[in-house]
Amino acid sequence: MSNYKAPEILEKEASELWDTLKETELTPKSRRDIPQQDMPSQDPDIRRGNMEEVAVGYTAEQVFVESARCLQCKNAPCINGCPVSIDIPRFIKEAGDGKFGPAIDVIKESSMLPAICGRVCPQEKQCMEQCTLGKILKDPEKSVAIGRIERFLADWESENRPETAPELPPSNGKKVAIVGSGPSGLTAAADLRKAGFEVTIFEAFHKPGGVTVYGIPEFRLPKAIVEREVEGLMRMGVTFENNFLVGRTRKLKDLMEKDGYNAVYIASGAGLPKFMHIEGENLVGVFSANEFLTRSNLMKAYDSNAATPIYQAKRVAVFGGGNVAMDAARTAVRMGAEEVHIIYRRTEKEMPARVEEVHHAKEEGVIFNLLTSPVRILGDEDGRVRAIECLKYELGEPDESGRRKPVPIEGSEFTIDVETCIPAIGNTSNPLIKQTTPGLEFTRWGTIEVDENQKTSLDHVFAGGDISQGAATVILAMGDGRKAAAAIIEDLK
Amino acid sequence: MNKILEKKQLSADVFRMKIEAPLIAEERKAGQFLILQVDKELGERIPLTIANADAQEGFIEIIFQAVGATTRQLSRKEAGESVEAVLGPLGQPTVIEKKDGPVVCVGGGIGVAPMHPIVEAHHKIGNRVITIMGARNKDLLIMEDEMKALSDELIICTDDGSYGRKDLVTVPLKELCESDTPPAEVIAIGPPIMMKFCAETTRPYKVHTMVSLNTIMVDGTGMCGGCRVSIGGETKFVCVDGPEFDGHLVDFDNMMMRLKSYKNQEAHRCNLDIEAEKLEAERK
Ligand SMILES: Cc1cc2nc3c(=O)[nH]c(=O)nc-3n(C[C@H](O)[C@H](O)[C@H](O)COP(=O)(O)OP(=O)(O)OC[C@H]3O[C@@H](n4cnc5c(N)ncnc54)[C@H](O)[C@@H]3O)c2cc1C
Ligand SMILES: Cc1cc2nc3c(=O)[nH]c(=O)nc-3n(C[C@H](O)[C@H](O)[C@H](O)COP(=O)(O)OP(=O)(O)OC[C@H]3O[C@@H](n4cnc5c(N)ncnc54)[C@H](O)[C@@H]3O)c2cc1C
Ligand code: SF4
Ligand code: FES
């Protein structure tokens, strides 16, 4: 797996290639022959020991070369793949021409958080999956690296454009409360504030950002980026009430009836960890990915000066194959574990994690146990984890969805010695708002029931992001925030 | 930021603080707790029970024992200074209902503090309250006057007999269970080992016994699962499903194991544990 290339080499290759490309008249044929630009990243051996961002970002020359791969398709199928319909060919065209300012403006017409989305969107399942170039090359991973260009532009903007507060209309005297400061809440706040509303975001944690600060690690999404977005909102006059748990500190109804909020947007996320309900799950050394990641990210347990401890283990097993599992595994590597296992029931192809994260995890030495599932966790006499027992699976007949279902192989039990287990098998929604808000309708999965405008069963109450979609993605949460803001503007007219 | 309005030292390592928190003071009910953070960037979030509150004046009170890094850091703060964050009220409130028989409230050590609002609430609705307070010695007893004022009967036990009865709290509890007017309900709050033995004491008499669990927590909102315990074979989160549970269903042994998760790392021994181990040793 060692095709790692140092950033200096990638930079040199790109600038040499660009020197020849810029002199040539490009045809669709020659464009498709341009190699995709790798994302420069920290050396795996070094980054295993630090929390700094792994991907360091394209150079300008890499952006030029990568943009030259875009065929500028008339029908632009990539736009259909984007949950917020960014005009992709237009921003790539501007970027390729070196007009980074206009390019980022195109993105910002549709997306509020490009620096975050450029880093965490599962592009190969969205825009890149639809990209014509990828179709020609028969591999969505070989499509135009849209997200990497997006990220470059967002970073360019934050370095080159002074932070200015946008012109705001005078307050219209109406108040909107937003529950939760994740991507969905932040996006709705921006749109509502721009429309003249007085906006307050209520957040249970001591820092705003939702999963982007407590879940997604620093090495994948530096917290400074989220802080910048939050500061931008503060400059716009959005109020943040941290350490405020809606439902307990104040009931939703009281926010509206006693505190004068005219509408509420609930964007409280999917913050309830699922466990597998296997034997040994309450042993010492078993942590939900949420707990493990919160300790290391939000509570900064990786810093030796932080008061919050994190459990020390040489060998760690993470159950699951999504982004959460990759983040937990790679955090464990950085917290000093020598042997980190991913245990996943299906094959790599079915892993829901972003391809880049799987690739990075492998480079960092994470061991992938595929077609494998834990059956129980074994403890020692002090109730501490000492090993896990797993069962091997094989792919059976395709089911209705066409997916070949993994079936257990009888008698294939084996054990792996570990001191920590981290179930990362998904999250469901926190029941607190449900328990404390009579009249609010929920689905049978515990998500809030909403119509196509994010409206709930209660008047002037809207919901979106993970609390209505179930654990989804940053961009979908953001899209809901936009829709809800538009609906609230309409509702309070 | 929440301002510390008043600070008192109750015993060698137990402190009482009034902290400004108007919304929490207004909403809180008996049995609920809060999460406190002394320092925002590198600080820990620790759960503490709301021992008292005044909605008019907008403050809450906490009573805590300095057992480790964060509680010690907090104990060094003075009136006029602030703590970074207070989140609450958290958890399900205690169920306070009119009872036919006496309600027995057993508070061990620092557990008397969380018991205070519960005793107060039962007293208010006219229940007959018998309070049993236990401590290692006289100097470690807290809130005696307050508890006396709210209880129909107050029984004090010390391990060394330096004050009140020389007994473990389970002894008078057993006597009450065997008396002509057995408790309609028992609530026990204190070190895990004490709660475990209180539950064992009442089990043969089938007296409903609630305990308030003090597991390790991170967020206190149901997000991490670090506070989970096994209740009648089912996993529950103390911060959102509790903190009070039916003591006869709690897997105390697992909970006590989990409380020791960071023992090696925290590098100092918890006073609660020392007390608990002593209690256990004395039983054997
Ligand atoms: C470890 C991890 C990695 C991920 N990786 C990716 C990725 O690579 N790409 C991607 O697209 N998606 C990823 N996701 C999913 C993505 O982060 C979420 O879909 C997205 O953050 C949802 O946004 P949201 O605004 O709906 O909620 P959240 O981000 O969950 O924010 C909700 C906020 O509401 C607060 N809150 C909850 N209840 C209350 C209340 N009652 N009162 C006040 N505040 C409350 C919470 O504390 C939280 O801060 C990942 C998720 C995790 C956990
Ligand atoms: C719902 C709830 C209510 C509580 N109410 C009170 C209260 O009113 N007053 C009070 O003094 N304490 C209370 N506690 C316990 C208090 O939260 C802990 O003492 C505190 O978190 C210890 O933090 P520390 O950083 O000072 O110690 P640490 O350095 O974290 O720990 C020191 C020692 O204490 C142990 N420990 C850690 N957390 C706990 C815990 N939750 N319970 C017992 N031992 C622990 C550690 O294993 C270690 O041995 C409550 C706990 C819960 C869950
Ligand atoms: S589909 Fe691909 S090649 Fe076509 S415009 Fe979009 S990014 Fe460019
Ligand atoms: S403290 Fe995190 S779920 Fe209870």
Image (spheres, rainbow, N blue to C red):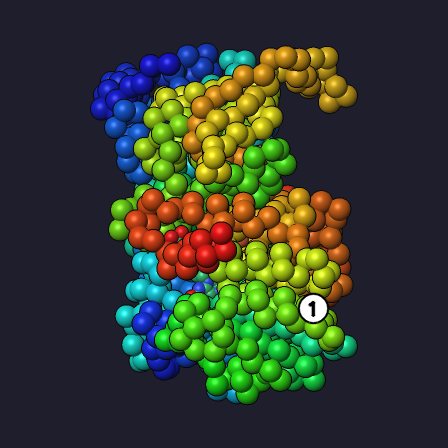
Work out whether residue A392 can be spotted: yes
Q: Residue B162: image x %, image y %?
A: 40, 75
**Residue drawn at (35%, 65%), measured in percent from left and top?**
B66
A229 vs A320, nearest the viewer: A320
Q: Quadrant of residue B278?
A: bottom left
Element type at mark 1: helix
Chain holding disc 1: B
B278 vs A60, nearest the viewer: B278
**Residue drawn at (31%, 38%), measured in percent from left and top?**
A51
- Note whether B199 is above or below A331 in the view shown: below
**Residue drawn at (29%, 19%), measured in percent from left and top?**
A5
Q: Residue B204: image x %, image y %?
A: 70, 57
A347 vs B163, nearest the viewer: B163
- Note whether A138 is above or below B75 in the view shown: above
**Residue drawn at (37%, 71%), measured in percent from left and top?**
B14
What amino acid type should be assigned to the residue bearing mark 1? Glu
Instruction: Identify the residue under disc 1.
Output: B178
- Note whether B159 is above or below A366 in the view shown: below
